């Protein structure tokens, strides 16, 4: 028995591949900022965490824009299905950007 892939899996995979290619620097900056926060002294930790959160918010916004632009081409019910699938895919592939993507 063959497992059925989600309706939008291929499109979402391509969109996330594009995000990763076009935003490699942002992703790398997030990794570096998280590392900097983790290794920061107590007096610097809050500022380092703020830097990390700002970068994550930027990535989340880019992903949400990508998602919403595609969703705008679909009817409402289909768009809701797509948005849910996209958000799940972001959680699996780019966990750091998934926390607030549903709120965007």
Image (spheres, rainbow, N blue to C red):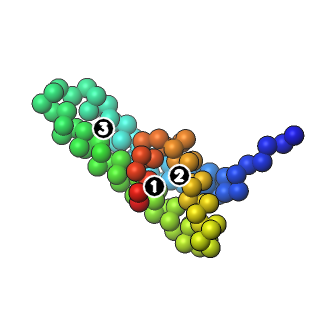
Residue at image location 52% in from the left, 47% down from the top: 90
How many marks are shown on the rendered structure?
A: 3
Residue 87 % position (x, y): 53, 52
Residue 32 % position (x, y): 33, 36
At mark 1, the secondary structure is: helix
Circles 1 and 3, Cβ within 8 Å, touching? The answer is no
Residue 50 % position (x, y): 23, 43
Residue at image location 50% in from the left, 62% down from the top: 66
Q: Which residue is mark 2?
A: 87
At mark 3, the secondary structure is: helix
Residue at image location 62% in from the left, 51% down from the top: 13
Q: Which residue is mark 1?
A: 102
Q: Is residue 62 visible?
A: no
Q: Is residue 66 visible?
A: yes
Q: Earlier in the sequence, mark 3 or mark 2?
A: 3
Q: Quadrant of the N terminus?
A: top right
Circles 1 and 2, Cβ within 8 Å, touching? The answer is yes
Q: Quadrant of the C terminus?
A: bottom left
Q: Which residue is mark 3?
A: 33
Q: Earlier in the sequence, mark 1 or mark 2?
A: 2
Label 3 or label 2, whichever lies nearer to me, is: 2
Question: Dividing the picture into quarters, in which one does residue 8 lie?
Answer: bottom right
Real-space Cα separation, disc 3 to disc 2, in angstroms: 23 Å
| Image height of 45 relative to 85, above or below | above
Toward the viewer: 73 or 84? 84
Real-space Cα separation, disc 1 to disc 3, in angstroms: 23 Å
At mark 2, the secondary structure is: helix
Toward the viewer: 99 or 97? 99
Q: Residues within 10 Å of mark 1 (few under 14, many from 20)?
A: few
Q: Earlier in the sequence, mark 1 or mark 3?
A: 3
Toward the viewer: 68 or 10? 68
């Amino acid at each position: 028995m063959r497992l059925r892939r989600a309706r939008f899996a291929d499109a979402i995979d391509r969109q996330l591949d594009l995000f990763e290619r076009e935003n490699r620097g942002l992703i790398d900056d997030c990794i570096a900022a998280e590392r900097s926060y983790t290794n920061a002294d107590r007096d610097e930790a809050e500022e380092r965490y703020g830097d990390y959160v700002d970068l994550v918010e930027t990535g989340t916004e880019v992903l949400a824009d990508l998602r919403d632009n595609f969703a705008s081409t679909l009817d409402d019910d289909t768009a809701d299905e797509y948005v849910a699938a996209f958000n799940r895919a972001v959680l699996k592939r780019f966990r750091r950007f998934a926390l607030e993507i549903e709120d965007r």
